[in-house]
Amino acid sequence: MVPTVKAATISNVTFVRPAKFYFSGYSNIPYITYFLIFMCFVYIMTVVGNVFLMSVIYLVRTLHTPKYMIVFNLALADLCGSSASIPKVLDAFLFDRSEIVYEDCLSSMFFFYFFTDVQSWILVIMAYDRFIAICFPLRYHSIVTKPITHRFMFSLIASFWLFAITVTLTAAGLLTRLSFCKSVIIDSYFCDHGQIYRLACNDSTPSYVIGKLLPVLILWLPLIFILFTYLYIGYALTKVATVHERVKALKTCTAHLSLVAIYFLPIIITFVYMGNIHPNVRIINLSLTSVFPPMLNPIIYVLQTEEIKKSVKKLFKVKLHTKIPIEK
């Protein structure tokens, strides 16, 4: 395949840029069409579930608290992150349109990594919320209802969104300084940062460095924060008098721990064993780890959070006694 190229000149240096990149990620996997149809189903469930969860939080005023402000942002990040990758994957491999325009590829890569970064750091904020709830149980409701807490939580969430924008914009911007005079075939199912900079024929050291930093900032650093938070929570629970109170406190963390497990564990396993597994298995694993958490997150919160379940019942009026007569 001979690519169409275009030249760009920056500071008297000519960069050769392809008009398009081509994906090869799913092309050699048997019966991949069935897997992609399954991904289409997962994407539909992701959209329905996250839109439903955001709608419930928006419509029920009792859920307008810092805790559910965080949940709303996670649902938004899940929805946007899935929409940044899955539709193009389905279009590319179901309809045999495996090419993507150079500019669109960089944009797609930016949004994929940006929302992945946001998802990780929102899970950190959720861990902080559970830390306050368990370590300061008597003051939790008074803390979260204060206007200053709402402003603090909004500022915290906004700062992580800004941090994610800065990191991913830097990664995408460095790719524009690379010259692609060799292959333009990306051995992945999306515009993978690592796969792209390895195709360059000029010095890609800055992109290599940021490529090593991305897993640290997106995966390892948030996970370390979460682990230390739960270590402190565990230490605080050892001081609780009864086993019943400890179990009750831990139950309030089950939704968050479930989200952390389904988000981080598959990615860690894939990265640890990446060198020892077949490339096709690696691609399938990576695609599953990027689509399953956004689909499961709203299901977990609806099923495991009592306030959400009560709010859903209230919205759809499924209580047995919707009206109770008032005695005068």
Image: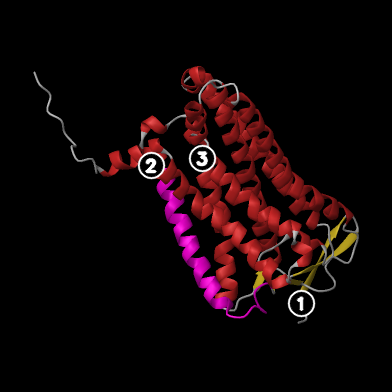
| Amino acid, disc 3 | Thr
Q: Are marks 3 and 2 in contact (CB under 8 Å)?
A: no
With respect to residue 295, does 241 lie above or below? above
Please indicate whether residue 242 sits to the left or right of residue 217 in the image. Answer: left
12 or 94, which lies in front? 94
Give the residue pinned by disc 3.
254
Please indicate whether residue 180 sits to the left or right of residue 146 in the image. Answer: right
Q: Nearer the viewer, mark 1 or mark 2?
A: 2
Give the residue pinned by disc 2.
56
Give the crowd class for mark 3: few <14, some 14-19, many >=20 residues within 10 Å.
some
Q: Earlier in the sequence, mark 3 or mark 2?
A: 2
Give the numbered dot on residue 102.
none
Please indicate whether residue 143 sits to the left or right of residue 218 in the image. Answer: left
The residue that appears at 64% across and 51% down in the rendered structure is 265
Give the crowd class for mark 1: few <14, some 14-19, many >=20 residues within 10 Å.
some
Which element carries disc 1, helix, strand or loop? loop
Q: Which of marks 3 and 2 is in front?
A: 3
Which element carries disc 3, helix, strand or loop? helix
Residue 22 appears anywhere in the view: no
Q: Quadrant of residue 207?
A: bottom right
Give the x, y percent position of residue 260: 59, 45
Which element carries disc 2, helix, strand or loop? helix
Quadrant placement of the N terminus: bottom right
What residue span does the magenta drawing correspond to?
Answer: 25-54
Q: Which of marks 3 and 1 is nearer the N terminus?
A: 1
Is 28 covered by the magenta stretch? Answer: yes
Give the residue pinned by disc 1.
3
12 or 73, which lies in front? 73
With respect to residue 172, does 253 lie above or below? above
| Amino acid, disc 1 | Pro
Q: Earlier in the sequence, mark 1 or mark 2?
A: 1
